[in-house]
């Protein structure tokens, strides 16, 4: 049944329809229509011809000049030596142009390092309650959200210990005050941090220290499953530190297995290492890895001590990159090295030579594409010529053949 309004609208429409008169087409109108159709058909045919010609040119060009494959990270065995690693062909880009530092992206990495060692950033003390620990971490995340920051680099393995539930390593002294003691009431700080970060669209980069076993300020015995207790023959006192031997296969395997365990079990966005591989040199104190090096030479190795140490670190970097990509290709692998690769490599730069002092050949890792991002620690001002922030940044950007992300690590004000 229709309403009165519907009936009125229907009657009005019928009136309009009956008033329309269709007139016959004249000869002139017919000629104009044919002429317009001819113009449209001619235009379409001409464009089709041009498109086909261009397509043919592209096919011929593809046959005569096939595209060159982009380099992929070099795949090598774990017992490689430096001379056995072929250099890949660099990517041809505009990275060597003066405009290389100009942003061409629409998204930025705005991250924060949150150190747990010695309770630098979080937690602020090792005797806080679980509620206080959560409150402090949420305060950091909320402040990050206010500042529009988008990545939390959280230190979860500061000295061979864990800020997460692990079957491999003990709970951290810096979390509960006693190595091996779990939070009470129980919670998993890493899982909590991941969930709260992701709620705020903040990435969680899990930060590991691969070989440091103890800081000078730590007290008390090692937990039975700490790496220094499991492998005491490779735990060396170096000044006020205890450092594991990066040349020992057992130590390499321990570090690798610990990191891969986290990659498998947690929804992290990245694995992050900082600048600590071999310890920073202390004047007059030699790193006591002579027994391990002599065993390498006795087994037929011929690298010098310095090259052997660098090779130990190279093996670990490659192994981690390969292992992460095999399990979760979307998880990034990043390193934050000391800001100077080698003195003089960037014009006028002087300072510690990390290649010789801590045996980190960062340029090699970049040359072979073993990283997803690099965040060199550029803790210097612009003006001093010997350690100039823009000069060093430009050098890192230019020496990036795989065009990995370069995130400028720079000391800033606290976000707390």
Image: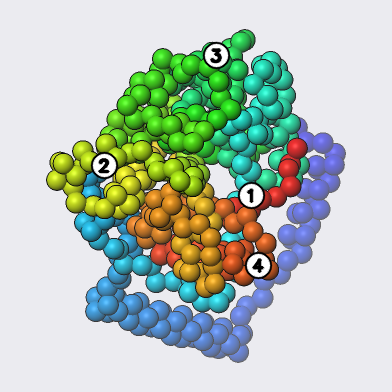
- Residue 377 in the image: above or below residue 188: below
Instruction: Report the residue marked by disc 2.
Output: 293
Q: Earlier in the sequence, mark 4 or mark 2?
A: 2
Nearer mark to the viewer, of 2 and 1: 2
Q: How far apart are marks 2 and 1 (CA)?
A: 41 Å
Instruction: Report the residue marked by disc 3.
Output: 182
Q: Earlier in the sequence, mark 3 or mark 4?
A: 3
Q: How crowded is mark 4: few (under 14 residues within 10 Å), some or many (20 or more)?
A: few
Q: How crowded is mark 3: few (under 14 residues within 10 Å), some or many (20 or more)?
A: many
The answer to whether marks 3 and 2 mark residues whose Cβ atoms lie closer than 8 Å is no
Answer left or right for 72 relative to 131.
Answer: left
Q: Distance between the residues labelled 4 and 1?
A: 26 Å
Label 2: state its secondary structure. Answer: helix
Query: Can the viewer see residue 323 in this picture?
Result: no
- Residue 209 in the image: above or below residue 371: above
The answer to whether marks 1 and 3 mark residues whose Cβ atoms lie closer than 8 Å is no
Q: Earlier in the sequence, mark 3 or mark 2?
A: 3
Towards the viewer: 39 or 314: 314
Residue 60 image label:
none
- Residue 361 in the image: above or below residue 330: below
Residue 110 image label:
1
Q: Which of marks 4 and 1 is nearer the N terminus?
A: 1
What residue do we see at 51% from left, 49% from top?
336
Nearer mark to the viewer, of 4 and 1: 4
Instruction: Report the residue marked by disc 4.
Output: 384
Image quarter of the C terminus? top right
What is the x, y in percent for residue 390?
61, 67
Towards the viewer: 154 or 227: 227
Q: How far apart are marks 1 and 3 (CA)?
A: 32 Å
What residue do we see at 45% from left, 16% from top?
223
Q: Distance between the residues labelled 4 and 2?
A: 39 Å
């Amino acid at each position: 049944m229709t309403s009165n309004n519907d009936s009125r609208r229907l009657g009005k429409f019928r009136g309009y329809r009956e008033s329309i008169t269709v007139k016959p087409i004249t000869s002139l109108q017919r000629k104009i229509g044919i002429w317009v159709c001819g113009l449209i058909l001619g235009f379409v045919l001409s464009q089709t011809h041009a498109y086909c010609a261009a397509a043919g040119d592209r096919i011929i060009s593809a046959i005569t000049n096939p595209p060159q494959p982009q380099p992929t990270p070099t795949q090598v065995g774990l017992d490689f030596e430096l001379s056995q690693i072929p250099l890949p062909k660099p990517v041809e880009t505009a990275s060597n142009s003066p405009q290389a530092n100009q942003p061409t992206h629409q998204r930025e990495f705005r991250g924060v390092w949150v150190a747990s060692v010695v309770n630098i950033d979080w937690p602020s003390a090792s005797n806080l309650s679980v509620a206080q620990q959560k409150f402090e971490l949420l305060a950091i995340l909320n402040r990050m959200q206010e500042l529009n920051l988008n990545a939390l680099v959280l230190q979860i393995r500061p000295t061979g210990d864990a800020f997460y539930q692990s079957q491999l390593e003990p709970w951290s002294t810096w979390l509960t005050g006693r190595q091996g003691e779990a939070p009470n009431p129980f919670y998993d700080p890493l899982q909590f941090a991941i969930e709260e970060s992701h709620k705020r669209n903040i990435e969680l980069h899990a930060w590991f220290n691969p070989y440091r076993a103890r800081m000078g300020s730590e007290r008390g015995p090692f937990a039975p499953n700490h790496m220094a207790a499991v492998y005491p023959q490779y735990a060396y006192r170096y000044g006020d530190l205890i450092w594991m031997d990066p040349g020992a296969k057992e130590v390499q395997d321990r570090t690798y297995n610990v990191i891969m365990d986290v990659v498998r079990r947690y929804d992290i966005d990245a694995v992050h290492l900082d600048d600590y591989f071999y310890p920073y040199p202390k004047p007059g104190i030699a790193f006591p890895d002579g027994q391990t090096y002599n065993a390498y030479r006795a087994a037929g190795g011929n690298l010098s001590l310095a090259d052997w140490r660098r090779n130990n670190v190279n093996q670990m970097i490659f192994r981690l990159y390969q292992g992460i990509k095999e399990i979760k290709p979307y998880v990034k692998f990043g390193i934050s090295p000391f800001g100077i690769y080698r003195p003089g490599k960037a014009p006028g730069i002087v300072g510690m030579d990390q290649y010789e002092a801590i045996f980190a050949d960062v340029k090699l890792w970049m040359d072979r594409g073993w990283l997803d991002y690099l965040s060199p620690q550029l803790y210097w001002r612009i003006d001093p010529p010997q350690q100039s922030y823009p000069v060093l940044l430009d050098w890192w950007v230019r020496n990036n053949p795989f065009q990995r992300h370069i995130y400028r690590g720079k000391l800033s004000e606290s976000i707390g």
